[in-house]
Amino acid sequence: MKSRLLSLLLVFGFAGAFAKDKGRLYYQIRVYHIKPAQEAGLDNFLQQAYLPALHRAGIRDVGVFKPISQDSSDNKVYVFTACKSLDQFASVNNQLQQDNNYQAAAGPFLDGYNETAPYVRIETILLQAFGEMPAYALPALSSPKNERVYELRSYESATERSHASKVKMFNAGGEVGIFKRLNFNAVFYGSVIAGAHMPNLMYLTTFNNKADRDAHWKSFGADPEWKKLVALPEYQHNVSHQDIIFVRPTEYSDI
Protein backbone atom coordinates (compact mmCIF):
# COMPACT_ATOMS: atom_id res chain seq x y z
CA MET A 1 0.00 0.00 0.00
CA LYS A 2 2.75 2.42 0.99
CA SER A 3 4.83 1.93 -2.18
CA ARG A 4 1.75 2.29 -4.35
CA LEU A 5 0.72 5.53 -2.65
CA LEU A 6 4.24 6.94 -2.76
CA SER A 7 4.33 6.29 -6.51
CA LEU A 8 1.11 8.27 -6.82
CA LEU A 9 2.58 11.09 -4.77
CA LEU A 10 5.63 11.24 -7.02
CA VAL A 11 3.35 11.68 -10.03
CA PHE A 12 1.76 14.73 -8.39
CA GLY A 13 5.08 16.08 -7.13
CA PHE A 14 4.26 15.90 -3.41
CA ALA A 15 6.53 13.13 -2.13
CA GLY A 16 9.63 15.31 -1.75
CA ALA A 17 7.87 17.64 0.64
CA PHE A 18 6.81 14.75 2.87
CA ALA A 19 10.34 13.35 3.09
CA LYS A 20 11.52 16.62 4.64
CA ASP A 21 9.22 16.34 7.64
CA LYS A 22 8.43 12.84 8.85
CA GLY A 23 7.03 14.11 12.16
CA ARG A 24 3.73 15.23 10.69
CA LEU A 25 0.76 12.93 11.18
CA TYR A 26 -1.29 11.45 8.37
CA TYR A 27 -5.05 11.89 8.47
CA GLN A 28 -7.82 9.90 6.87
CA ILE A 29 -11.34 11.20 6.35
CA ARG A 30 -13.80 8.48 5.39
CA VAL A 31 -16.99 9.95 3.98
CA TYR A 32 -19.91 7.55 4.14
CA HIS A 33 -22.57 8.41 1.58
CA ILE A 34 -25.84 7.00 2.88
CA LYS A 35 -29.59 7.03 2.44
CA PRO A 36 -31.65 8.22 5.43
CA ALA A 37 -32.76 4.65 6.16
CA GLN A 38 -29.12 3.56 6.49
CA GLU A 39 -28.13 6.11 9.15
CA ALA A 40 -29.13 4.11 12.24
CA GLY A 41 -27.27 1.02 11.03
CA LEU A 42 -24.14 3.05 10.29
CA ASP A 43 -24.26 4.65 13.74
CA ASN A 44 -24.54 1.24 15.36
CA PHE A 45 -21.61 -0.10 13.32
CA LEU A 46 -19.39 2.86 14.10
CA GLN A 47 -20.22 3.00 17.80
CA GLN A 48 -20.32 -0.72 18.58
CA ALA A 49 -17.75 -2.16 16.17
CA TYR A 50 -15.53 0.25 14.26
CA LEU A 51 -14.46 2.75 16.94
CA PRO A 52 -13.77 0.08 19.59
CA ALA A 53 -11.70 -1.87 17.07
CA LEU A 54 -9.71 1.23 16.10
CA HIS A 55 -9.06 1.92 19.78
CA ARG A 56 -7.75 -1.64 20.21
CA ALA A 57 -5.54 -1.06 17.16
CA GLY A 58 -3.92 1.99 18.78
CA ILE A 59 -6.02 4.76 17.21
CA ARG A 60 -6.83 6.74 20.33
CA ASP A 61 -9.17 9.47 19.05
CA VAL A 62 -11.70 8.97 16.27
CA GLY A 63 -13.95 11.81 15.14
CA VAL A 64 -17.41 11.09 13.77
CA PHE A 65 -19.26 14.09 12.36
CA LYS A 66 -22.56 14.70 10.60
CA PRO A 67 -23.52 17.78 8.55
CA ILE A 68 -25.86 20.10 10.43
CA SER A 69 -27.92 20.44 7.25
CA GLN A 70 -28.12 17.16 5.33
CA ASP A 71 -28.92 16.73 1.64
CA SER A 72 -31.73 14.18 1.75
CA SER A 73 -30.58 12.70 -1.56
CA ASP A 74 -26.99 12.14 -0.32
CA ASN A 75 -26.57 12.06 3.45
CA LYS A 76 -22.99 11.96 4.67
CA VAL A 77 -21.08 10.91 7.77
CA TYR A 78 -17.44 11.93 8.19
CA VAL A 79 -15.01 9.73 10.13
CA PHE A 80 -11.62 11.22 11.03
CA THR A 81 -8.59 9.16 12.10
CA ALA A 82 -4.89 9.94 12.49
CA CYS A 83 -1.80 7.76 12.11
CA LYS A 84 1.93 8.32 12.47
CA SER A 85 2.77 6.77 9.10
CA LEU A 86 1.35 5.18 5.98
CA ASP A 87 2.56 1.84 7.34
CA GLN A 88 0.32 2.31 10.37
CA PHE A 89 -2.71 2.85 8.13
CA ALA A 90 -1.93 -0.43 6.38
CA SER A 91 -1.39 -2.27 9.66
CA VAL A 92 -4.70 -1.01 11.07
CA ASN A 93 -6.57 -2.57 8.15
CA ASN A 94 -4.74 -5.85 8.75
CA GLN A 95 -5.56 -5.70 12.48
CA LEU A 96 -9.25 -5.24 11.73
CA GLN A 97 -9.18 -8.34 9.55
CA GLN A 98 -7.65 -10.31 12.43
CA ASP A 99 -9.83 -8.81 15.18
CA ASN A 100 -12.42 -11.47 15.99
CA ASN A 101 -14.44 -9.13 18.19
CA TYR A 102 -14.66 -6.61 15.37
CA GLN A 103 -15.57 -9.22 12.78
CA ALA A 104 -18.37 -10.54 15.02
CA ALA A 105 -19.75 -7.09 15.92
CA ALA A 106 -19.49 -5.78 12.35
CA GLY A 107 -20.82 -8.91 10.67
CA PRO A 108 -24.44 -7.80 10.12
CA PHE A 109 -23.20 -4.47 8.75
CA LEU A 110 -20.51 -5.90 6.48
CA ASP A 111 -22.76 -8.62 5.06
CA GLY A 112 -25.38 -6.22 3.67
CA TYR A 113 -26.23 -6.50 -0.03
CA ASN A 114 -28.53 -4.63 -2.41
CA GLU A 115 -31.62 -3.57 -0.44
CA THR A 116 -29.81 -4.30 2.85
CA ALA A 117 -26.59 -2.51 1.86
CA PRO A 118 -25.24 -0.46 4.78
CA TYR A 119 -24.19 2.55 2.70
CA VAL A 120 -24.16 3.82 -0.87
CA ARG A 121 -20.41 4.37 -1.17
CA ILE A 122 -17.34 5.27 0.89
CA GLU A 123 -15.12 8.16 -0.19
CA THR A 124 -11.60 8.27 1.28
CA ILE A 125 -9.44 11.39 1.64
CA LEU A 126 -5.84 11.10 2.80
CA LEU A 127 -3.97 14.13 4.15
CA GLN A 128 -0.69 15.05 5.80
CA ALA A 129 -0.62 17.58 8.61
CA PHE A 130 0.87 21.04 8.17
CA GLY A 131 4.28 21.75 9.65
CA GLU A 132 2.85 24.50 11.89
CA MET A 133 0.41 22.01 13.42
CA PRO A 134 1.97 18.57 12.93
CA ALA A 135 -0.57 16.75 15.10
CA TYR A 136 -4.31 17.06 15.65
CA ALA A 137 -5.74 18.62 18.81
CA LEU A 138 -8.89 17.97 20.80
CA PRO A 139 -11.13 21.06 20.96
CA ALA A 140 -11.43 22.88 24.28
CA LEU A 141 -15.15 23.62 24.24
CA SER A 142 -17.67 23.95 27.05
CA SER A 143 -20.98 23.35 25.25
CA PRO A 144 -22.76 19.99 24.85
CA LYS A 145 -21.87 18.13 21.66
CA ASN A 146 -25.32 18.63 20.20
CA GLU A 147 -24.87 22.41 20.30
CA ARG A 148 -21.38 22.61 18.85
CA VAL A 149 -20.56 23.83 15.36
CA TYR A 150 -17.52 22.37 13.66
CA GLU A 151 -16.46 23.98 10.38
CA LEU A 152 -14.76 21.77 7.80
CA ARG A 153 -13.17 23.80 5.02
CA SER A 154 -11.64 22.62 1.74
CA TYR A 155 -9.55 25.00 -0.38
CA GLU A 156 -8.84 23.83 -3.92
CA SER A 157 -6.18 25.50 -6.06
CA ALA A 158 -5.84 25.73 -9.83
CA THR A 159 -2.31 24.30 -9.90
CA GLU A 160 0.22 22.62 -7.62
CA ARG A 161 2.14 25.91 -7.47
CA SER A 162 -0.86 27.89 -6.26
CA HIS A 163 -1.63 25.12 -3.77
CA ALA A 164 1.93 25.40 -2.42
CA SER A 165 1.37 29.16 -2.07
CA LYS A 166 -1.77 28.63 0.02
CA VAL A 167 -0.04 26.04 2.20
CA LYS A 168 2.86 28.45 2.71
CA MET A 169 0.36 31.14 3.66
CA PHE A 170 -0.91 28.93 6.49
CA ASN A 171 2.57 27.92 7.65
CA ALA A 172 5.36 30.43 7.05
CA GLY A 173 2.84 33.19 6.37
CA GLY A 174 1.33 32.79 9.83
CA GLU A 175 -2.33 32.01 9.12
CA VAL A 176 -2.25 29.02 11.47
CA GLY A 177 -0.83 31.30 14.15
CA ILE A 178 -3.64 33.81 13.67
CA PHE A 179 -6.26 31.09 14.09
CA LYS A 180 -4.50 29.90 17.23
CA ARG A 181 -4.21 33.39 18.73
CA LEU A 182 -7.92 33.99 18.11
CA ASN A 183 -8.88 30.65 19.72
CA PHE A 184 -10.45 28.93 16.74
CA ASN A 185 -9.88 25.54 18.41
CA ALA A 186 -8.60 23.91 15.24
CA VAL A 187 -8.58 20.11 15.21
CA PHE A 188 -6.27 19.79 12.19
CA TYR A 189 -4.82 21.40 9.08
CA GLY A 190 -3.63 19.20 6.23
CA SER A 191 -2.72 18.92 2.57
CA VAL A 192 -4.69 16.34 0.62
CA ILE A 193 -2.34 13.75 -0.84
CA ALA A 194 -4.98 11.37 -2.21
CA GLY A 195 -8.60 12.16 -2.96
CA ALA A 196 -11.10 13.18 -5.61
CA HIS A 197 -10.37 16.93 -5.47
CA MET A 198 -6.72 17.90 -5.86
CA PRO A 199 -4.70 19.93 -5.29
CA ASN A 200 -6.34 21.12 -2.11
CA LEU A 201 -6.02 21.50 1.63
CA MET A 202 -8.54 20.97 4.40
CA TYR A 203 -8.90 22.08 7.98
CA LEU A 204 -11.40 21.81 10.83
CA THR A 205 -12.15 24.55 13.35
CA THR A 206 -14.60 24.19 16.25
CA PHE A 207 -16.96 26.43 18.19
CA ASN A 208 -19.41 26.20 21.09
CA ASN A 209 -22.34 27.23 18.89
CA LYS A 210 -23.27 29.23 15.78
CA ALA A 211 -23.03 32.60 17.56
CA ASP A 212 -19.57 31.69 18.84
CA ARG A 213 -18.54 30.74 15.31
CA ASP A 214 -19.79 34.00 13.82
CA ALA A 215 -18.04 36.08 16.50
CA HIS A 216 -14.72 34.32 15.87
CA TRP A 217 -14.87 34.88 12.12
CA LYS A 218 -15.78 38.53 12.65
CA SER A 219 -12.67 38.99 14.77
CA PHE A 220 -10.60 37.13 12.17
CA GLY A 221 -11.75 39.38 9.33
CA ALA A 222 -10.92 42.49 11.34
CA ASP A 223 -7.54 41.25 12.56
CA PRO A 224 -4.68 43.58 11.45
CA GLU A 225 -2.25 40.69 11.00
CA TRP A 226 -4.70 38.86 8.74
CA LYS A 227 -5.37 41.98 6.69
CA LYS A 228 -1.65 42.43 6.14
CA LEU A 229 -1.15 38.76 5.22
CA VAL A 230 -4.03 38.50 2.76
CA ALA A 231 -2.87 41.65 0.93
CA LEU A 232 0.61 40.30 0.13
CA PRO A 233 1.13 39.85 -3.64
CA GLU A 234 2.67 36.38 -3.25
CA TYR A 235 -0.58 34.99 -1.84
CA GLN A 236 -3.00 36.32 -4.44
CA HIS A 237 -5.25 33.97 -6.45
CA ASN A 238 -4.08 30.80 -4.70
CA VAL A 239 -7.59 29.39 -4.10
CA SER A 240 -9.84 28.55 -7.05
CA HIS A 241 -12.70 26.91 -5.15
CA GLN A 242 -13.72 26.46 -1.54
CA ASP A 243 -16.26 24.31 0.27
CA ILE A 244 -17.52 25.05 3.78
CA ILE A 245 -19.35 22.27 5.60
CA PHE A 246 -20.87 22.74 9.05
CA VAL A 247 -20.88 19.53 11.06
CA ARG A 248 -21.54 18.34 14.61
CA PRO A 249 -19.86 15.48 16.45
CA THR A 250 -21.98 12.46 17.29
CA GLU A 251 -22.41 11.69 20.98
CA TYR A 252 -20.01 8.75 20.62
CA SER A 253 -17.33 10.73 18.77
CA ASP A 254 -13.97 11.07 20.54
CA ILE A 255 -13.38 14.53 19.07
Image (cartoon, helix red, strand yellow):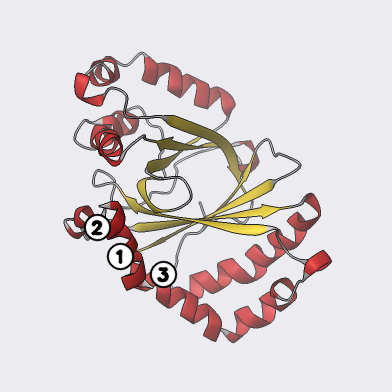
Eyeballing the image, is 98 above or below 198?
Answer: below
Whole-percent x, y for residue 74 in the image: 70, 45
Q: Which residue is mark 2?
A: 15
Residue at (38, 17) in percent of width and height:
221
> Is 140 or 110 nearer to us in this picture?
110
Whole-percent x, y for residue 212 in the image: 52, 25
Query: Label 1 to label 3, Cα distance in Å?
Result: 14 Å
Amino acid type, callout 3: Phe
Mark 3, secondary structure of its residue: helix
Whole-percent x, y for residue 7 in the image: 30, 65
User: Crowding at label 1, few (<14), some or many (≥20) Cα neighbours within 10 Å?
Assistant: some
Amino acid type, callout 2: Ala
Mark 2, secondary structure of its residue: helix
Q: Are marks 1 and 3 in contact (CB under 8 Å)?
A: no
Eyeballing the image, is 107 above or below 82?
Answer: below
Q: Which residue is mark 1?
A: 6
Q: Are marks 2 and 1 in contact (CB under 8 Å)?
A: yes
Is residue 57 among what the camera can see?
A: no
Query: Label 2 to label 3, Cα distance in Å?
Result: 17 Å
Amino acid type, callout 1: Leu
Residue at (44, 17) in percent of width and height:
218
Is residue 136 among what the camera can see?
A: yes
Give me the disc on residue 77.
Answer: none
Residue at (72, 71) in percent of width and height:
109
Q: Are marks 2 and 3 in contact (CB under 8 Å)?
A: no
Q: Which residue is mark 3?
A: 89
Query: Label 2 to label 1, Cα distance in Å?
Result: 7 Å
Q: Nearer the viewer, mark 1 or mark 3?
A: 1
Left or right relative to 166: residue 76: right
